[in-house]
Amino acid sequence: MSQFVHDRMLELMEAEGLKTLFGIPDPSFAAMFIAAEARGWRVIAPHHEQAGAFMADGQWRMTGIPGVVVGNQGPGVANLAAAAICAAKENTPTLFIAGQRQRIFEQRVRKGRFQYTHQPRYFEAAMKYVGVIEFAEQVDEIFHEAFRRALSGTPGPVYIEYPMSVMQTPLDLPPAPPPSAYRLTHQAADPGQIAAAVELVRVAKAPILLVGQGVFISRAHEAVAELARALECPVIQTPGGAAVLPGLEHRTFPYASPVGVEAVARADLVIAIGTEIGEPIHYGVGRHWAQGETRRKWIYIERDPLAIGVNRPIDAPLVGDLRDIAPQLTAPLRALNRKPSAELLAAETAFAAFKSLLLDTASTRSTPVHPARFAIEATKDLPRDAVLIRDGGSVSIFTGAYGQIAPRDLLWCQNFGHLGTGLPHAIGAQIAVGASRRVVLITGDSSFLFHISELETAVRKKLPVVCIVGCDYSWGLEVAVYKGAFGLQSPETEAHWGDQVRLDKVAEGFGAHGEFVDRAEDIAPAVARALNCGRTAVVQVAIDALANATEVPGFEEFASWYGDGGY
């Protein structure tokens, strides 16, 4: 079948399930954009390439299908660099496709070439693979290698350069093969290790299931929920995996919550799945793990064999795809016929009391709105199946502590702590779920302003994303850090922006629904109106800047992420 290189690129990506293209339609990609739309792709042009990469990330987290973002040669590709670093740290298998001048430019020694620089060197450290299509006939092998690298072991981003010199080359190739023809698509664990893991569970008195973000990105909610039911044990959320498995809300406890800390300390067996066992959970060794460390056993379900034994010793490594391993482990565990322990039932009661106490002791004043009350009022009437997006510092932490929804999907940039991902993540997530679910972003004003122009993208694409913005008119968490470390604020962390910053009016200017709220009792009704308006919406809530800086819940826990994991 005769086709051009861009047609073949689209066909190769379709074989992997991709049908959305993010990027600004610059000249290098005009033909690709036209062909993509003709093939039924959804084409999304952001206002900044970096935001486009974050949108692709948001879609990946809600589908388990890699995203693709393109950048025009020179400045467009440069705009992708920060997003590439973030993708590497967040383990996001985004395809970064870079336009480039004709290949002859690589060997020229002339100065002053317009929009030309040797681009791959800027991405090599962040990418799992860098490939340049030197000749049109290489397109299949380069894309296959890109997907092979991106989706093998720990997922990660890849870079493909698309020079102008190959754009109009015709190709005559057979249909694109399925992924199973060129990469490993399923990987169960070694049966011997499964048997060892089952034996560890059989003798355990107090196991816990440690669930990370990878479970949700893999769309393995149901499979891992079945594993949890077979174990009949507490489910501990890592900070990155702050969503809840279906039907297990009552026995799911955040890692650093009082009930979670007690379960961790008591545990004689940990089954870790979808997590790096990284610094935010103290590498599974320090802080809350210190008690009982010498007797505790570990089962680790992990795709990358090079991760086994790095952060801590592992007793039963189950190497492979958690989507294959979870049911593989669940089947023999069911035969153990485990029952919920008295300690588990007590933990469920204690956690319900803990959440009730947080609600009862949170500030009730009307104005200025305390950030804890902001989080409660903003979330208490959200749809139970809403996709929750978090962004920012203090506001994100308050939302994690006081939010009144147990989301089945929660997206935030936990590994890298990159601000400004929230609105693009929300756009990508809404594209992924379509009209079936609502996507709600809760963010601070600092982080929201990073990519506020993408409100226009959401409006243009008719995406009913609801953005609830807690505004302290300053760099809230940075204020907390300055005060904690130095007992003072810096000139640039003081509340100096002024309440004349009206994000609701900015939203209206983009064609979105906008509301401004400065009383606690008005937050929930404003959120309800935003949800019901059926279009992109922004609810701006003025919150207490001093409380947002000095009363951050669990700030000591957050600070313990620094200093080599707290041990």
Image: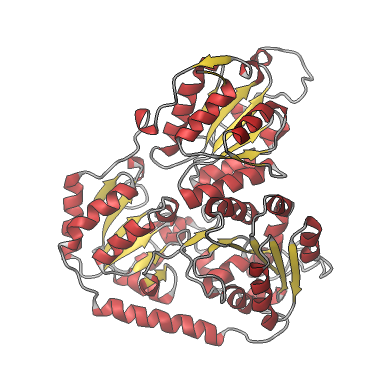
Asked whether residue 285 appears in the rendered view, the answer is: no
Q: Which residue is pictured at 63% across the width and 60% down the height?
A: 465
In the figure, 136 relative to 251: above or below?
Answer: above
Tally the marks.
0
The image quarter containing residue 216 is: bottom left
The image quarter containing residue 381 is: bottom right
User: Between residues 111 and 210, which one lies in front from this camera angle?
Assistant: 210
Q: Where is residue 481 in the image (x, y as percent from the top left)?
A: 64, 65
User: Between residues 35 and 149, which one lies in front from this camera angle?
Assistant: 35
Q: Where is residue 99 in the image (x, y as percent from the top left)?
A: 65, 27
Q: Where is residue 403 in the image (x, y as percent from the top left)?
A: 54, 73
Q: Position of residue 461 (x, y in %)?
A: 67, 50
Question: Colour mode?
Answer: secondary structure
Asked whether residue 153 appears in the rendered view, the answer is: yes
Residue extending furthest toward the right: 500
- Could you tell whether 329 is left or right of 511 in the image? left
Q: In which quarter of the image is the C terminus?
A: bottom left
User: Between residues 500 and 263, which one lies in front from this camera angle?
Assistant: 500
In the figure, 22 relative to 11: above or below?
Answer: below
